Image: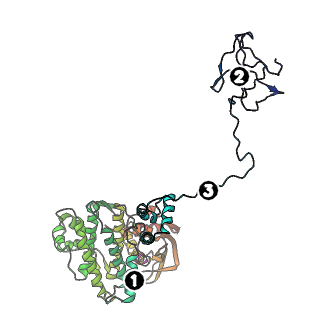
Amino acid sequence: MSGAGGFEAPDEHGGQEHGRQERGGQEHRRQERGGQERGGQERGGQEEEKPREGFDGAGGSGHDPDGAGAPEPDRPARIPTPRASVEDGGLPLPELTDPAPVPLDLPHDILKSLLGAWALAACSAAETAAVEDHLGSCGSCADEARRLREAVGLLHQPETLDLDPGLRTRVLGSCLERRPPRIPVPEWAAPYDAETARLDALLQDFGGAEWHAPVRLRWFAADGARNRRTTVAGVIAHLLSVDGLIAVALGLEDPLAEITGAGITGAEGAGAAQQQARSPAARTEAYWRTSRFPPTGSVQGPWREQSHSLVRSVSFTGGHAGGLAVSYGDFELPLHDAMLDRAFECWIHAEDIAEAVDYPYEPPAPRHLNRMIDLAARMLPAALAERRQQGLASPTRGRHLGLAGEPGRSLRLEIEGSGGGEWLIPLDSPAARGSADLEVAHVALDGTEFCQLAAGHIPPEEAAAGQAGDRDAIRDVLFAAASLSRM
């Protein structure tokens, strides 16, 4: 122990001492200057002290005869004292403001060359201050700066070149309000006119790769789903072939007059050949077989011209068809319904094309979609009766027999969403009338999903339908809806 209260610990060699450490009670006292030196090494108290490096890496030596351990007055402390901060003293912090830019002393030519960058706000703070200080004393530069600022105001970010999808409707609506058409398109032909125009707009920017993109046509036959692989150009050729049935009914030129005669073979007798020639699938297969090369983008022109001719021709009917019917081979449809059927097929196949090229495609307008759903609902009783004759529908238990036009057992078909509504579907006979009093089942479907079901794109078992009532009747109606589809 030393007189100053330090504790000296000799090392294992018995002659070396570490620097003294002062204690006050249980804690070490620190030097006022914040430094602490390690004492020299003494050997027997008679040897000279040798320099020794401190723990901070700095070398030093000194005599400590009194054992106080204080540094020399003319030497700085080895361990610097902590720096005082403004937070420690409770004083307010200084404001973090940028110093005011000092205007640069630039010649007139340099300042004039900076006017363009200044107008675009691309100058530094010092350059901006120099230019604005110069504008206050130079009239020519001030006029030039004003013109440049006005020019900058005319600049804007580049916008997309895609046209607004509703632009065509707004332009036509505005034009028709000012000057109605001399020969208006009948309301029942408007869906076909709109869907062919939408598909034509989708095809405008197609190149060779898009025209040859693979497309899978899907439909539902009596015993299950069917599909056929083709291309985008093949789909347009299919629409051209089937739309030709309406052209023939209207007395227009059949675009497949030569192809159908040479392409359809194997029929038994002339009557069967003629009936098969009027089938949509037969006409399409004949076109595909007799084409020298696979269909390409050149098929768009004939299809567009035919669709325009159909719209012009039905417009001359004055809004009525006069009982004209369109033959589909094994069945017929009135001209009004045939135009709705072709509008429906055009939309469905346009979605097939859009899916093949990964492009979004919206459903038809609500008023047009409602007409398409109404056509499918009106065709359901006949499709259900045909399936029952083929033994594909369940036997009718508790069948309500009645005269034509009399109410019979019915299913309430509720279509939700855009273009929806409610229809009472007679179950026992196509000639019966739907009756709410004899309702035995209720089915609810989304409008777009019902159309996909009627197009054969959704299996009847997978249709997300709300169901209540007779399960057999519900199943029969869902399968009958899918059987409305064809290639």
Quickly name the residue at label 3: 97
Q: How far apart are the alpha carbons under marks 2 and 3?
A: 47 Å
Residue 304: give x, y in percent of width and height. 26, 74
Q: How is the image coloured?
A: rainbow
Q: Magenta stretch? A: 368-373
Ranked by sequence position, the earlier of labels 3 and 1 is: 3
Left or right, 134 with reference to 77: left
Residue 472: give x, y in percent of width and height. 47, 67
Q: Can residue 221 be seen?
A: no
Q: Residue drawn at (69%, 52%), measured in percent from left and top?
A: 93
Ranked by sequence position, the earlier of labels 2 and 3 is: 2
- Picture quadrant of residue 452: bottom left
For badge 1, the amino acid type reads: Gly
Q: Residue drawn at (40%, 80%), measured in percent from left and top?
A: 170
**In front of the other: 57 or 342:** 57
Q: How far apart are the alpha carbons under marks 3 and 1?
A: 59 Å
Left or right, 285 with reference to 429: left
Q: Are marks 3 and 1 in contact (CB under 8 Å)?
A: no
Left or right, 205 with reference to 74: left
Residue 484: give x, y in percent of width and height. 37, 70
For badge 2, the amino acid type reads: Arg
Q: In this rendering, which labeled residue sits more in front, label 1 or label 2?
A: 2
From the viewer's perspective, is residue 90 above or below residue 349?
above
Quickly name the residue at label 2: 38
Q: How far apart are the alpha carbons under marks 1 and 2?
A: 98 Å
Residue 127: give x, y in percent of width and height. 48, 59
- Picture quadrant of residue 83: top right
Q: Mark 2: few, some, or many residues within 10 Å (few <14, many ≥20)?
A: many
Magenta stretch prevailing secondary structure: helix
Quadrant for the N terminus, please. Answer: top right
Quickly name the residue at label 1: 173
Q: Is residue 126 magenta?
A: no
